[in-house]
Amino acid sequence: MFIKTAYSGNTVKDYELLLKQLESLMEDEDNSIAILSNASALLNQFLEEVNWVGFYLWKHNELVLGPFQGLPACVRIPYGKGVCGTAIKERATQLVDDVMLFPGHIACDSASQSEIVVPIIIQDELFGVLDIDSPVKARFNETDQLYLEKFVRILESILNK
């Protein structure tokens, strides 16, 4: 099996444009499903070398599949399990270069090699996570993390209306 191992990433200028597009697209919208659906579509269109982009929502002490772009995915993820559950438990972004080395990784798509998960927290309450997978090892870098966290902060402000 051939595994790609290098990706140069999106530029800061690309990300600045993405953030403006998100704000414009979400202007005057208050339905969380519509917001998250368009946010996942926007990211899927913008990001290269990804195979899954979407959201898991915090419901009844577990993450439940929300709007996404990609192949069918795990429907429920327990607190503290896998990359998504760890992001919720630690309330911190998880940037994973090789998911096979992540303790307790949940393989929803065997093609996924790297992952970034950003928790969504509104008024100090867990809301869910933004989860992005790539078939490329070490696909995500610090620039991706910085701007995907900014992307989530914008979503948090919109969802908090």
Image: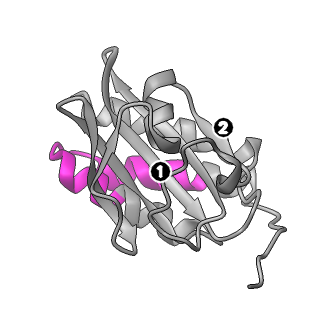
Percent x, y for residue 129? Answer: 40, 40
Position of the N terminus by quadrant: bottom right
Is 65 within the magenta? no
Task: Kindly identify which residue carries mark 2.
Answer: 146
Residue found 62% across the figure and 48% down from its top: 16
Distance of mark 1 from mark 2, alpha carbons? 15 Å
Q: Front-most of 145 and 62?
A: 62
Which quarter of the figure has residue 85? top left
Q: Main structural element of the magenta stretch: helix, strand or loop?
A: helix
Residue 145 lies left or right of residue 129; in this view the side is right
* Closer to us: 141 or 29: 141
Residue 157 visible at all: yes
Relative vertical location of residue 25 with respect to residue 31 in this rendering, above or below: below
Labels 1 and 2: the sequence-earlier one: 1
Nearer to us: label 1 or label 2: 1
| Circle 2 residues within 10 Å: few <14, some 14–19, many ≥20 | few
Task: Examine the rendering and report whether any part of residue 153 can be seen.
Answer: no
Which dot marks residue 2?
none
Task: Indicate the quadrant containing the C terminus: top left, top right, bottom left or bottom right.
Answer: top left
Question: Which residue in the structure is indicated by mark 1?
Answer: 131
Query: Residue at point 66% right, 42% down?
Result: 95
- For label 2, the SS is helix
Image position of 116 (left or right of 84): right
Magenta stretch, residue numbers = 17-38
Horizontal arrangement in the rendering, residue 132 relative to residue 113 (left or right): left
How many marks are shown on the rendered structure? Answer: 2
Residue 66 is situated, as x and y percent measured from the top left of the image, at 26, 53
Amino acid type, residue under disc 2 in the picture:
Leu
Q: Are marks 1 and 2 in contact (CB under 8 Å)?
A: no
Q: Position of residue 127 (x, y in %)?
A: 29, 31
Indicate the quadrant where residue 37 lies.
Answer: bottom left
